[in-house]
Amino acid sequence: MTTGKVTGVTANLITVEVDGPVSQNEIAYILMGEERLMSEVIRVTGNTASVQCFESTRGVRSGLPVEFAGGMLEVELGPGLLSKNYDGLQNDLDKKEGLFLKRGEYTSPLDEEIQYEFTPLAASGDTVIAGHWLGEVKENWVNHKIMAPFTLKGEWKLESIADKNHYTIRDTIAVITDADGERRELTMTQRWPVKVPIKVYREKPRPFRLMYTGYRIMDTFNPLAEGGTGFIPGPFGSGKTVVQHTVSKNASADIIIIAACGERANEVVEIFAEFPELEDPRTGRKLFERTTIICNTSNMPVAAREASVYTAMTIGEYYRQMGLSVLLLADSTSRWAQALREMSNRLEELPGPDAFPMDLSAIIANFYSRAGVVYLNNGETGAVTFLGTVSPAGGNLKEPVTESTKKAAQCFYALSQKRADSKRYPAIDPQESYSKYLESPEIRSFLTERSGENWVADVLSLKNRMLRGKEAQDQISILGDDGVPVDYHVDFWKSEVIDAALIQQDAFDPIDRFASVDRQEYGLKVVKEICDRDFSFGSFEEVAPYFKKLINSLKQMNFCEFDSGQFKEFESELQTTLNEGEVA
Amino acid sequence: MQSRAFQKIHTKVDKITKATITLKATDVGNEEMAWVDERLAQVVKINGNEVTLQIFVGTEGISTDAQVVFLGKPPTLKVSDDLAGRFFNAYGRPIDGGPEVEGEEREIGGPSVNPVRRKQPNQLIATGIAGIDLNNTLVTGQKIPFFADSDQPYNEVMAKVALKAKADKIILGGMGLSNDDYLYFKALFENAGALDKIISFINTTENPPVERLLVPDLALTAAEYFAVDKNEKVLVLLTDMTLYADALAIVSNKMDQIPSKDSMPGSLYSDLAKVYEKAVQFPAGGSITIIAVTTLSGGDITHAIPDNTGYITEGQLFLRTDTDIGKVIIDPFRSLSRLKQQVIGKKTREDHGPVMNAAVRLYADAAEAKTKRDNGFDLSEYDVRTINFARQYSESLLAIDVDLDIDAMLDVTWRLLESHFSLDEVGIKKAVSDKYWQGGE
Ligand SMILES: Nc1ncnc2c1ncn2[C@@H]1O[C@H](COP(=O)(O)OP(=O)(O)OP(=O)(O)O)[C@@H](O)[C@H]1O
Ligand SMILES: [Mg+2]
């Protein structure tokens, strides 16, 4: 084991003189009396290693002994990850003692005492490769596959496998041997370095299904693909976190992983409080049963914040290997980028734009590329869908993190300050936002199959109407209400109907916050019919009151259970208004 | 912070900059405090046996043979109930002529609360100001700043909120406070008969700016004592955090760090978050609520200081002078309390959420109508109604001199809506309007 001695400290950057080999990203521990401060090597020059410390460096001094761990930052993967609250380094926060986080206290991520009921899926004599499903256990309601280590090279033979019975994660459940007679005992867990993607699959095709979120502006207008990527930039207070939280409750995913990366502790506490109570709309099980939270809030050490997104991604990839659909949410990836910036500045690297590291774009692109839908070696399909938020400095989207992310992600959900100010939530800008999946042939054929021949064309036509409405509004504000033809008012108000009925959605209303696919199909149909109608008004002054009435009925419908009695009442009210319009 | 008798005295300084000195010393820890002649200093960098110290009052007149004594510990504060009613400087030394406070010595700027040990904040703080209680309801354990230009009466509004808030302790962290403002707070607390529950840590404009850096940590260490050890509801007032951030910038520039936006250190977000995230609700009942002031220059909230603050705090209260009514209001557009949904409609009446949103939406329509008017266009009849509504709404609810209880605020809003709009135009969920709407169709 390589050891060393501290030779310098600036904030959380520590220099260490080493007495043996060290590798980039190797984990080191600064020994400060009883406390072991975990750190990561980020630069080596001669026999000096620069390490970023994952803890407060208060009191660290020259001469302190350092131990190098020999490996990179790893997570432990196995049953028991779900329903856990981890910090960025996968310490189980619930196992930590006391009100305050104690420096140097590391807790085990999984539970060693639990007896899991193991059912074998492979038989002795089987050929085993990395990621092979050896068996499964029930983790909450999820069939958690026990897999051969992802690090396995080549083909191995399954010598023996445990019978259907109860075992702990430390018990041996399988023995494998390779051609040279090397023998390995396997347990239900394995370790994996977080910065390395898990690539134990046959193929990564283009996404071909949707990840439904329950938000119409996303699913209908700018759909996110299962295995796809998207991001939500927006100034502070514009609704990034609310969108992510709502999506985490409603999304059509098997597993949700939430990385609270350098944001507020109270927002995570909200999830802690709500998720054990709330139901997953698809399974009826409690939400926390399908959720893992990685929580490295803004006041927790900066270096661990950088690690937290990788920890979350690795856990996501692990569940993908089980043939599950994982949705990974990270709030906010800007805080991760800022952590990179702080370190890069301390290392006195040549700064790029806004003092971010020069390779920021590459780092972001690399991370987003870990998402994706995959065909596993056994033919099953798994996916990691990634949706991140970006917090642009000054709300200005022309800044390095937003621009780099835009290159890496396929969906862009831009939150607009103006919409947030006028409480048009979610404040996703209908003009600026886009999903490249709407153009993808695979997704188009999925949509045709699910929602009908005309679906994409209808969506595009309403998007077009939104643009027309915007143009009409601009003209009206330049030329005045009576300086434009009445049609301009009608165009504008049609876009207001789309906005009010399909784009706005109150995340805090128990009904409105989630729109099922059926409901979205119905909504699009109704609104499209209104938009395709010809109305004739005597003067511009008649236009607004008429459309406001339509909007009011549509909004009331949004607040009612779909197809309920009350819903139908407002539907017929809407119809009446429409019939009156015909006469007018 | 007394020096220990057996401590080694260093007398050879190798390097002096405007804010720091560097000397050779061994067995010195990061962030350790030291005396340099009569001045307090803190270790900010260690390179082999070279130690760099930041001297809070500055290095003017420091000579290469200055006496340097390391204290063997980071900055600390002695905490006990005797803190109550006292005024201290930025080092935690009494400035009110009273004795030193005895008590347990605690490191300031200590560790964070484990997120899983927090409780979700859910207790409403009523202030009587409708711009706050109605539109941006505050909750214990919240952290929220006033965003205000320097000519706005932010300290007055903050003090009013503090006295109304029914806190067990109010801790004032003054940074770059003018002497007048300091005396204002002192007199106000005295007159309110509240002095025994107030603790103040004060750095005025007469003190060196870098000293301010210790103020929030001192205030919050005292707050943690009362909130954790005594289960009290503590309200911490920090004014002005812009001047705190300026001090951070001074230090980081002196340390040759690469500045990021607006000459602020790249770590500004983390530095501010460390302060604000001390706001917490504990399950045992104690809480720390932080109300701060961030002064703006020319209303610019895209500047790095308000921008980073907004990304950290749970909303902001934006003060603006409404020229229509000639009063300072809490601007409903840029203001926000993110914890309001924890109490709105749960601790307050069911109509609170819908009626609040409807009024703000119509107020936004008024803003558009005003733009139209300013561009010289004719106003529609609806435009005129929204403008009339906006004036009355501003006058009877948004102005900071309003003092009502929350039910009254809701009733006032309904009556205003009824007198200017039809039910369709208001667009409120029928179940709610059925119950509260007294106007016509
Ligand atoms: N869909 C929505 N429905 C109703 N209210 C919303 C919605 N989205 C946002 N809001 C309101 O806006 C506030 C701010 O939203 P949120 O916390 O998500 O902002 P944010 O973009 O994450 O900000 P920050 O960058 O500072 O974290 C919420 O507390 C809520 O009051
Ligand atoms: Mg947020």
Image: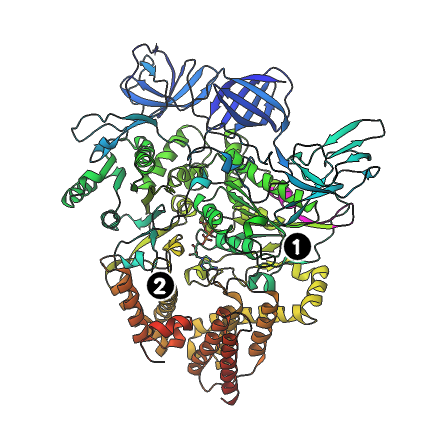
Q: Local crowd at mark 1 within 10 Å, few (<14), some, or many (≥20)?
A: many
Is residue A41 visible to us here? yes
Q: Are marks 2 and 1 on the same chain?
A: no
Does A124 lie within the magenta span?
Answer: no
At 46% across and 39% down in the image, what residue appears?
A: B260
Chain ID at mark 2: B
Q: Residue furthest left?
A: B191
Q: Amino acid at mark 1?
A: Glu
Q: Quadrant of residue B329?
A: bottom left
Q: The N terminus of chain A appears in which quarter of the rendering?
A: top right
Q: Is residue A494 above or below residue B340?
A: below
Which residue is at 38% across, 76% downward?
Answer: B423
Return the residue at label 2: B352
Q: Is residue B163 left or right of residue A140?
A: left
Q: How is the image coloured?
A: rainbow
Residue A81 is situated, as x and y percent measured from the top left of the image, at: 60, 41
Q: Amino acid at mark 2?
A: His
Q: Is A365 within the magenta?
A: yes
Mark nearest the camera among 2 and 1 is 2
Q: Which mark is residue A226?
A: 1
Magenta region, residue range: A364-380
Q: Is residue A36 left or right of residue A408?
A: left
